[in-house]
Amino acid sequence: MRAVIAEDSVLLRVGLIKVLEMGGFQVAAEAGDAEGLLAAVEEHRPELALIDVRMPPGFTDEGVRAAMEIRRRWPGTPVVLLSQYVEERYAADLLSANTSGVGYLLKQRIADVADFVAAVRRVADGGTALDPQVVAQLLLRRDSDPLARLTPREREVLGLMAEGRSNAGIAQALVVSESAVAKHINNIFAKLDLPVVDADHRRVLAVLRFLGASRA
Amino acid sequence: MTIPAGVRRSALRARRDTGFLAAGVPPHLALVPVWAWAATTTAETGNWLLTVSVSAALILLGTPVLTAVQRARYRALIGVDVPRLTPIAPEQRTWASTARWLAATRPWRKIGYHLLLGPLLALLELLVLVLAAAGLAGVSVYAWTWALPTGIRQDWFGYLTELPVYTAAGLLLLCALPWTARAVARAEARLALGLLGPSRAQRLQERVDQLAVSRTDLIEAVDAERRRIERDLHDGTQQRLVSLAVNLGLAIATRPDLPSDAREVIARAHLEAKEAIAELNDLVRGLHPAVLEDRGLDAALSGLAARTPLPVRLRVDLEERVAPKVESVAYFVISEALTNATKHANAMRAEVIVRQVGEVLRVRVTDDGLGGADAAAGTGLTGLAKRVGSLDGAFHVSSPVGGPTTITAELPCAR
């Protein structure tokens, strides 16, 4: 699978390329800013774009805006945003149009190579990968009544679901059986009045919409 | 023979002050001919309209010149700086502002100084000069009677009886000169500062304005410095640490064949690198988060609250973004309050309320911890109070022993 990278720190770019190659990606192009990134995507039409949020010239949210531009001009291109800090507002922007093929992770997650590669693959396959810290911020912003009806374990499952994990992934993370996870999920959907859907990413969409991350 | 330092200093000071007083006589008498002429001409011709208008014109023209001369005299001869009146900026010159300026500065005080006080001061100055001359004449009386023809000198009986008295009186006068001259010079300086310079209220007003500007500059400089440090750490150390952790992660992932003790060492290094990243992130984010600048206070508080290890209830009610320096102080207050709640108060939960009421941003952080926090005890709270104070805000801590602790800050946020 072909990937394009936009990251202004050369040091980190080198490490990122090694990690991606280990995960079976080929890095077709690397850019140091948003302009270079858009040109590279135009040229290579990659199956994945990994984008640093803070890039020259303003060092604020250039990456977020570039990611939205990519999804507007080349719909369906999976993008993963990487950042030193995650912000729910940026996540909301990113998820506002479509939650499939979207990732937003802390840079330090790259260090856990296997998990990171799995998350990036999930996004490349049309799934979602949100950093637990983004999910925590989204949950915080929705501290209203329906969430109070959830048990602590159900809240945990909801958080993992919002990160974009499948039933199997959640079961593994919580060290429980998949059928127990499925039961929790049914309870959550019932308590939050969410429509019951079977496909993983549509379920994520429902959860994110509930949390207010995608207000489209 | 050496002159004692004290005597020498007094002599020099007396010379300086007397010179200063002597230099004051001409400008202080400058307007006397004007009113003398006006008085005599009016008496002779009875045409007071002419004399009044001509002398008024002369006085109005002469005042700025005389003021400049006096200002130069005070500065050059006794080192007293008589400040100028700050004029109104040309672009704000209106009838109303001119009237306000006149009322505040009362420039006619200057005319009073030159026209009425000047001659009196000149008299005082002349008196001091006469005393000085008399003193000099007295002490040197023997020297110049020596110059008289021998006959007169010998016939004059007073040579033995009167002249010692003159010498003693001269010495007395010269000894008193430093103090007399000093007293008159000081009195003149006081009058000049009061009548030629800005009034006390105006000087204080200008000082307050100056201090307000320099304080704002200082706060902005501190904020800019925090942003710069945040940027430097973000672009430098943080990227390097992440790269280090990534490389260690790669070593773990790609070399399962390494001996177990080596793998253990690498795994520990990997863990420590990740912990260092987390710690540095927390520290740097407390400085000045980029999202605060980019998306405002509400957005920045999500990350802050989510990173706090205890459950935080966040309620933000802002109609629009407030000034960056207000956002920055509000963020800092909440960040410190949550850190205190976690680290020192052993709180189980906290609540943050931010609300804009009119032109005041009200920030309240409550935790259910141990309480007993004292804003006067030189903790982080003192720093918070100072930062809030720098915006003319109000800061209040209520923390009875046993809790709960409530920290409130009210920040003026008029745009």
Image: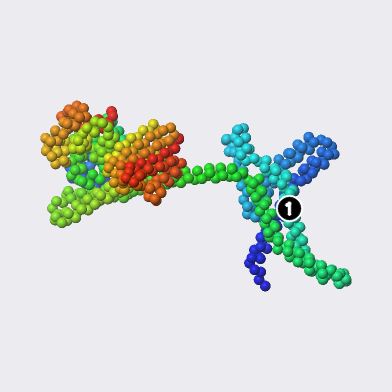
User: Looking at the picture, does residue B404 appear above or below residue B163?
Assistant: above
> Picture quarter containing residue A94?
top left
Colouring scheme, one of rainbow, by chain, secondary structure, one colour: rainbow
Residue located at (18% from left, 50% from top): B252
Is residue B282 rendered to the left or right of residue B70?
left
Q: Residue furthest front?
A: B401
Disc 1 crowd rating (10 Å Cα; few below 14, some 14-19, many 20+) is: some
Residue located at (49% from left, 45% from top): B214
SS of the residue under disc 1: helix
Letter of the chain that mark 1 sits on in the rendering: B
Looking at the picture, tell me which residue is in the foreground, B400 or A67. B400
Which amino acid does the dot numbered 1 rest on? Leu
Quadrant of the frame with the C terminus of chain B: top left
Tell me the residue that label 1 is attached to: B124
Could you tell me if residue B278 is visible in this image? Answer: yes
Looking at the picture, tell me which residue is in the foreground, B159 or B243. B159
* Spot occupied by residue B336 in the image (x, y as percentages of width and height): 35, 45
* Spot occupied by residue B4 in the image (x, y as percentages of width and height): 64, 68
* Spot occupied by residue A54 in the image (x, y as percentages of width and height): 32, 41
* Spot occupied by residue A124 in the image (x, y as percentages of width and height): 20, 36
Residue located at (77% from left, 37% from top): B52
Residue located at (40% from left, 37% from top): B362
